[in-house]
Amino acid sequence: MSEVDELPRFPFESDAALEPPAEWAELRSKCPVAHVKLASGDQAALLTRHADVKQILSDPRFTRPTPADDAARISDSEEGGIFNSDMAEVIPQHGEAHLTWRRGIGKWFTAKRMNALRPGIAAMTEQLIDEMVAKGVPADLKASLGFPLPVWVICDMLGVPDADRDRFAHWSDTMLSMTRFSAAEMKAAEQEFGMYMAGHIALKRANPGDDLLSALITDPEPMSDVTLIATGIGLLIAGHETTANMITKMVAMLLSDRTRWESLLADPSLVRTAVEEALRLDANAGVGMARYLTEDVEIAGTVLPRGTTAMCSMAAANRDEEAFARAAEMDLGRTPNQHLAFGAGAHACLGQPLARTELQVVLEVLLRKLPSLDLAVPVQDLRRVEGLVVGGLVELPVRW
Amino acid sequence: MKITVDQDKCCGAGTCVLLAPDVFDQRDEDGIVVLLDSSPPAALHSLVDEAASVCPAAAITVSSS
């Protein structure tokens, strides 16, 4: 047995769907730089404290590992899934080129644009809730609302017709799921999606609309088609499964102790801070963010040598007692809430204002339309689904 | 209260604008922060402090003078 085989295997398992694995608290207090074995069998240094995770994520010298780096592989699939695809190489990760790409997209995620999207997102949410209610209780809130809504929103941003939303959802689901589909199925979905996007881009080039894709195409310095397709895939990767699962987990957390739901019914102005608190307490947020250390760096008194892959567990950091008073408690009014759910620094989640907006709107509409919403099963019957980008719940049975 | 912003650090997350739209804005062309009011009225101080502390890029500095 090699040394790596004796290391703890990361990610850790948790029995309860909404509770964190016990290892997080243990490592934060005793072993802030923990050597772990990833699903691929490769070794990484796991960081779990708020200050350390924030330091590494904010350090402009370090980025997500690219295939050129000799970094630890996260996935155990031969291909490494979407993480090792061509897409990963098309979107620039470093320096000036990354900044240019990011700022070109960034103007589509301003707070002003998000506020302008709110009525449309609210209307989609109402439609999905109406359809769920029409089918009667019990309903699966994940399948009825959490899963479709973010795809509808992304389709809207890309100018994709409503009729193609379901195909988009299928491709997104297949490309991102590391466990439910074979490598061949994932590859096929990526190719179908690429072909659809190529056709869609050609249509938009001939007939631009008022959407993100048209704006990128008609920009004085337009992106190449390959970069446009990669950007479309990137938006789905970043914005679909993540938000879908977060909507579901947020509602589950709020209903698992129904006094929380009742507090929000009594004072809907708590929606904003409640969303942040749900993001902070997400106990199944995926593996976190990897950073490839291109120089030696000191963390919590330990020098991590150049060539180390650091796994930053934002979810573990978000429960650090050093950073949050009563860190294990859900405080719906917590302010300020310096959680790291969206990362930190130059690579912090580009779509965070969109995710916030979607989560806030979903919660507002649910409170208004279904005030009697409740879990249809005991909380201990909720089951986790693991994911690399993000984990979630298998389903969320609800009644009203 | 005196606020300064660092546009080179800013990652355009828009958190500050969502919290205090009277104090912060974003450039239309790239989403980078624009300071509208460097010494806002006291009623906005707690929101500005919150915006500074949750800024993912630590691009907002608040001093008491």
Image (spheres, rainbow, N blue to C red):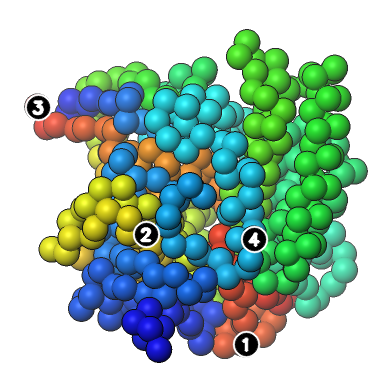
- Read off the residue under disc 1: A381
Residue, far top:
A220
In-image side of A270 versus B46 (left or right)? right
Q: Amino acid at mark 3?
A: Ser
Q: Quadrant of residue A317?
A: bottom left
Instruction: Check contact, mark 2 vs mark 1: CB within 8 A.
Output: no
Q: Position of residue B5 (x, y in %)?
A: 27, 26
- Read off the residue under disc 3: B65
| Image depth: mark 3 or mark 2 in front | 2
Q: Position of residue A326 (x, y in %)?
A: 27, 71
Q: Quadrant of the C terminus of chain A?
A: bottom right
- Read off the residue under disc 4: A79
Give the crowd class for mark 3: few <14, some 14-19, many >=20 residues within 10 Å: few
Q: Nearer the viewer, residue A168 or A226?
A: A226
| Image depth: mark 1 or mark 3 in front | 1
Tell me the residue at 67%/47% (across/down). Answer: A236
Above or below: residue A233 compared with residue A172: above
| Image depth: mark 2 or mark 1 in front | 2
